[in-house]
Amino acid sequence: MALQYYIAGRSACFAYSMPVAGNLLHHAVEMVLKHLLAEKGVTESELHYKFRHDLKKLWRTTKHALADASLTTYDPVIRIIARMYDVRYPRRSYSFQMSIRKEPTRPPTGSAAKGLRHYHLSLEEADELMTALLTRSTTTEWISGRLASGDAKSQYLRENFHSFI
């Protein structure tokens, strides 16, 4: 499911469905982290009740379980993607921006932006993170096989500088 959410999130980004893209990418990261923890022996019950949809908690536990200090590089991306869950339950108005490449965040300004919660996500950063996670949980052959149908492979490869197939 992680790969399907990831491809759907990338597709939504190119369709300018910004809040949906962020939410789908949140689910993709959540699913791959839960997969990695399940491989380390975390039970389905723990994954459901202890972690729920808390990416930050899943991330801390996954980094510890994998004992891979290089994963700390992705802490800022996890913090950004974790916020995407909030969009599901908007308590107040928000603005949402998504960029294809890494670029500085420019929150909206002016009186119309006052009080808005601002969300920004870089697809390139999400691609880097997903590649780092997927390469720890599967093989190139498995990914290629799952991308063989329909439009999935082209959606995966589209402007993806971090593809591993």
Image (spheres, grey):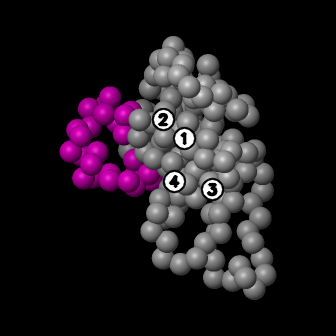
User: Which of these two is toward me, 13 or 2?
Assistant: 13
What is the x, y in percent for residue 110? Answer: 78, 81
Q: Is residue 45 left or right of residue 136?
A: left
Q: CA distance from mark 2 to mark 4?
A: 13 Å
Q: Secondary structure at mark 4?
A: helix
The image quarter containing residue 165 is top right
Residue under pointer 1: 8
Q: Which residue is mark 4?
A: 23
- Give the labeled residue for mark 3: 18
Q: Identify the residue at horizontal 51%, vertical 53% (top origin).
A: 23
Q: Could you classify mark 3 by the number of other residues whose Cα lies within 10 Å: few (under 14), some (14-19), or many (20 or more)?
A: many
Q: Which mark is residue 46?
A: none
Residue 103 place in picture, x, y as percent: 78, 51
| Residue that mark 2 sits on | 4
Task: Kindly check if marks 3 and 1 are in contact, taking CB atoms under 8 A apart as contact.
Answer: no
For the residues labelled 1 and 2, say whether their Cβ atoms are less than 8 Å apart.
Answer: yes
Q: Is residue 12 above or below residue 159?
A: below
Residue furthest to the front in view is 150
